[in-house]
Every structure is written in C-alpha cells, then in structure tokens.
Amino acid sequence: MLSANLDHLETVPYIHPDLLQFILQAKDFLAMKPEAGRHELVGDKLFILVMETEVQPLEQRRPELHEKYLDVQILLEGEEILGYGHMPTGPLTEDKLAEKDVAFTAMIENEKFIRMAPRDFAVFYPAELHRPQVSPSGETAPVRKAVLKIHRDLLA
C-alpha cells in the first residue's frame, strides 16, 4: 500500500515512474470534474470509476482484493477511512475474480486504517486486502471518490 496526496506528490519520490504518470493522468482528468461513471483512459487497461456514494460503518463494509488490477483509491469530497492489511481471516466469502476481478473476505487480520482527506489517495496492488468506504464517524455519509484501475500488465 502506498498513500499520498494528489497535490503533494513530492512526498513519494520513490514511486515507480509509470505509476506516477498514470496518477498524473488521473489528476488531470479529475480536474475536469467528470460525471459519475466509468471513464476509459486506455480501454480496459486503464480506467477511472467516478462515484458519488456513501461511507458506512465498518461492520457494513467488506474487505476486498483484486487479481489483475491495482486500485488507486482517490477521495474527492468528504471523509473516508480505508482499512488494509496482509492476511485475511478465514477463506474468501465471495469470489468474483474471474468475472469482475474482485473477491471478498469477512475480516482482515491485524487490520490497519488510514484516514483520507480530499485529494488523498492510496494504491493497493493486486492481492492487497483493503476495505474502502468506511465512515470515520460510524454514520453513513456522502462522499465523492474515484478509483483509478490500472491493469498489472501496464506496470510489468
């Protein structure tokens, strides 16, 4: 997991140059304030999902992982907590890797949390467990966010 802010990329000078270029491309695209939905930058290999959604209490959010895509979770408006960790607690509870590149687990062992502010982002590589859209207050609240999806082949 890697975390930074779109306006302070100098805090991560060690970021892979290709990954940095994709994040800069997303930053430029998001500056145009796109509508909610899927926006392809390079077909199925690089796209952005812009969402107007809600954060929810921790127990209502399921940890997830991906096999083919990196997730760059970008908070645009509101507040959000992201959970993350290395080990699932128990087996997958739902496996949609083949059709949607997502699988869920019930819990993350020794889960850690990061509090996101607008324009903060966190990168989750394939197989890295993460739990997005957790409410800092424990109450449901609106957020606007984007998820940049980068196919792992683009960073090979």
Image (cartoon, rainbow, N blue to C red):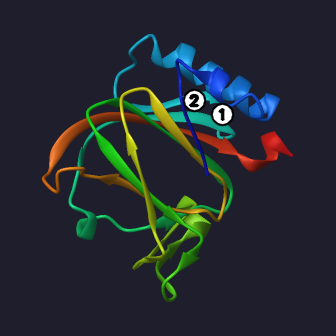
Residue depicted at x 65% and y 40% = 44
The reply, left or right, for residue 152 in relation to residue 79 is right
Question: Residue 29 versus residue 118: which sits nearer the camera?
Answer: 118
The quadrant in which residue 107 appears is bottom left
The label shown at residue 43 is 1
Image coords of residue 30 (percent x, y): 47, 19
- Secondary structure under tag 2 reads strand
Residue at far bottom of view: 90
Image coords of residue 87 (percent x, y): 57, 77
Residue depicted at x 68% and y 31% = 12
The reply, left or right, for residue 63 in relation to residue 17 is left
Question: Residue 79 versus residue 142: which sits nearer the camera?
Answer: 79
Q: Where is 83 relative to 24, above or below?
A: below
**Mark 2: which amino acid?**
Glu
The reply, left or right, for residue 104 in relation to residue 61 is right
Q: Which residue is mark 2?
A: 40
Q: Are marks 1 and 2 in contact (CB under 8 Å)?
A: yes
